[in-house]
Amino acid sequence: MTTVEETLAAAPAVQAARAAIGAREGIWIVGGAVRDALLGREVTDVDLAVAGDPEQIARWLGRAAEGHAFELSGEFATWRVQAREAPWHVDVAALRGDAIAEDLTARDFTLNAIAVPLAGGDPIDPTGGVRDASAGVLRAVSDRSFYDDPLRIMRAARIASVLELELDRATIELARRFAARAAEPAGERQLAELRGIVAGPDPVRGVSLMDELGATSAVLPELDALRGVEQNPYHHLDVHDHTIEVLARAVELEADPGAVLGNLADDVRELLEEPLADELKRSGGLRLAALFHDLGKPRTRSVAPNGRVLFIGHDQAGVEVIHSICERLRASRRLTSFLESLTHNHLRLGFLVHERPLSRRQVYQYLVATAPETVDVTLLTVADRLATQGRRTRSEAIESHLELAREMIAEGLAWRRSGPPTPPIRGDELAAELGIEPGPDVGRALSEIEAAQFAGEVASRDDAVALARRVLAVD
């Protein structure tokens, strides 16, 4: 069996640090690197705790590794060294307290409170982290863990779900005691933990652990508000459990797109691997959209005279809710726009199913309305549809939706490759032909020309001018 020392020694970041710093005393490998080594996981990034000046150590390492050293946090005296050509970094922080044992006992969880001397040696483990690693248990270091930093409640859900650990019962109770404070840390710190949960290997368990620890009601009260919101007989779950099922279906679709999408799978897989925003890939954005897409339902729920439950306008209401959440979590404009777009458009395909076969004009309108997230939002509708299995749901209706989704994903992928049609005439040229001033009317005519060109109704400059004359009623 590979030892902790052997696993650490094989990590390029550790090799670089040892080559740069040598056997100098007062420097320890701490945190996630030691934890991952204990759990038999590959070590990439490394944290060092130093009894000295972290800037000096970081600059030594930066020069030796031909990397870039910069201050990461003035408040916590932390510097980062980013490798120039390799995918690793080393964070160097000043020791918290006068000794390494004091530093470790101030950390969050026992698995993260183990140190190994950079020069090599046995683990320093004052809180029993090695034992907990062997047992697969995540345990708070002390009764002050969540008091000192309430963000650790979210972190517990993330680490336990990502590393497949069981939460210690006393740690669960301790987290619940401080759960109301989970939203106190800065929004971007909350988003970082939420991102790690949603983009991790088991986001459904991660969200469930947030619930168990009491964090959801504090950090995402809008998600918590979906509990008990009953739906119509086409649904077999309330809005909250349906949302979790949509998330699960999105994860399944991401893992095996070919099961639903056939020969489109490779292109979809490639798209989902693209960077999106806020350190999320498009796959992570889709998962977050699955979690958020029905947040407008509680405020729009109504019951028709015939007893049918309705959520008219929940798509637009959801956009407003998401905007508020993203402001609170300090999400980027790009991520906010992505989530708003998927939520606003997640009903469109369902409405079109009943109008099949679609005209080229209808396809064009869908592409224009959903671009540049056409494929993403269509994937969300697939997950949403597969998660809707009420007693009135017909298998033929699901298959019709999936067939149309495949058609629209193919169209969306083609649109991404080639872009919208280029009209055969420029706006200024069209204005001159029509004898009118450039302005909104010309823009309206060009939009109509573009749609007609996509539909195969316009093939030449003369066709475009003739169409513009009809649209604007210009002789």
Image (cartoon, rainbow, N blue to C red):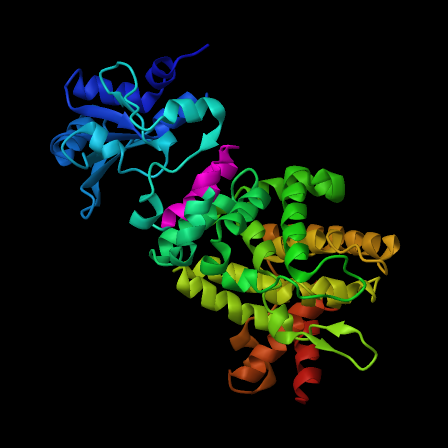
Q: Quadrant of residue 84?
A: top left
Q: Quadrant of residue 202?
A: top right
Magenta-highlighted residues: 151-171
Residue 87 image point, x, y percent: 37, 31
Q: Residue at x 68, y 89 (%)?
A: 473
168 horizontally vs 130: left or right: right
In this rendered view, identify the residue nearer to me: 13 or 137. 137
Residue 283 image point, x, y percent: 56, 46
The reply to whether residue 334 is in sight is yes
Q: Quadrant of residue 472?
A: bottom right
Residue 245 image point, x, y percent: 67, 50
| Quadrant of the drawing holding the C terminus | bottom right
In this rendered view, identify the residue nearer to me: 473 or 379. 379
Q: Residue at x 66, y 55 (%)?
A: 241
Verify whether residue 155 appears in magenta: yes
403 horizontally vs 328: left or right: right
- In the rendered image of this protein, does residue 308 appear above or below residue 175? below
In this rendered view, identify the residue nearer to me: 144 or 32. 144
- In the rendered image of this protein, does residue 226 appear above or below residue 277? below
- In the rendered image of this protein, does residue 273 appear above or below residue 436? above
In this rendered view, identify the residue nearer to me: 433 or 59. 59
The reply to whether residue 455 is in sight is no
User: Furthest residue to the top?
Assistant: 1
Q: Residue at x 60, y 50 (%)?
A: 417
Verify whether residue 112 appears in magenta: no
Most common SS among magenta residues: helix
Count how many numbered circles sit on residues in the image: 0
Residue 335 image point, x, y percent: 47, 57
